[in-house]
Image (tube, helix red, strand yellow):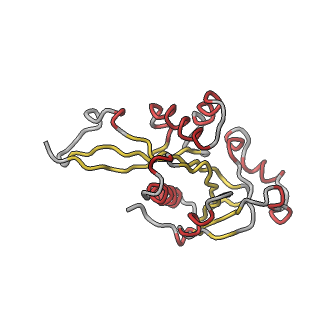
Amino acid sequence: MGSVSEMLAVVPLHQRPDLLESCADLINEEWKRSRTSRIHSLQRSTNDFPICLVLIRTPRAEEEVTEEKLAKNQCQLLGHARLSRVVGHPKSLFVETVVVPKAIRGKGYGRKLMEAVESYAKARGYSHLHLTTHDKQHFYAHLGYTLSKPVQCAGFVSSLIPLEFLESLSPSQHARSGKNNPGASNGSKAGANLCPLP
């Protein structure tokens, strides 16, 4: 048998339902919520947005390994991020619930997760990412994100109500302010700066 190394991949959570409970626990480690409610929310991930992406690590032998041989329980959950559409910005996505397990922070997995999210968005034809952070401004600035005007995230509502209808109800982007949450920073990154996944 060949030597074993690790392989990182970002996959939609709805394609890996075996990771649903682990993902709920990971997010609840950072932001407490009922586990049942969290799982219900994660189960709503879809290719049409919002979509939950998970960063996973799987062992990889140097010789060919089929998916059937690689048991799903051999992978390790390294991170989660959710992408939603942005009201009034057809080429933009909103990134939220970005989290890496506390035990492995500071080892570059947050950066790998964000790079993979950017690559995923770019591959789907989106050129801008937006996010809000309360305490990670330095991390996102280091990745190339800059302060921007607030945007309105469509979230899970967009899976029930057409985005066009939400846009018709949306107040002007200039009318929104960050006064409700003065500690939060709104950041965005343009598609021209999106990095490919190594």
What quarter of the picture does the N terminus occupy?
Answer: top left
Using the image as rendered, state which of residue 178 and residue 193 is in the foreground: 178
The one of 65 and 180 positioned closer to us in this rendering: 180
Q: Residue at x 53, y 67 (%)?
A: 143
Count of numbered tags: 0
Q: Quadrant of the C terminus?
A: bottom left
Q: Is residue 77 above or below residue 37?
A: below
Q: Is residue 71 above or below residue 54?
A: above
Residue 114: % across, % down: 51, 58
Extreme residue toward the left, this view: 1
- Quarter of the image for residue 51 reads top right
* In the image: residue 155, left or right of residue 65: right
Camera-side residue: 9 or 107? 107
Query: Image check: 31 left or right of 184?
Result: left
Quarter of the image for residue 176 reads bottom right
Q: State the image coordinates of residue 149 (x, y, percent, origin top left).
A: 74, 67
Instruction: Give me the residue at 63% from left, 50% from top.
Output: 84
Residue located farthest toward the front when viewing the structure as drawn: 103
User: Measured along the vertical axis of the image, is residue 73 above or below residue 77?
Assistant: above
Image: 36 above or below 30: above
Q: Please give the name of the residue rendered at 61% of the width and 61% of the height, measured from the top-left corner.
A: 129
x and y percentages locating residue 141 in the rendered image? 59, 69
Instruction: Give coordinates of residue 42: x percent, y percent.
Output: 58, 36
In the figure, is residue 63 to the left or right of 21?
left
Q: Residue at x 68, y 69 (%)?
A: 147
| Residue 174 vs residue 5, the one in the foreground | 5
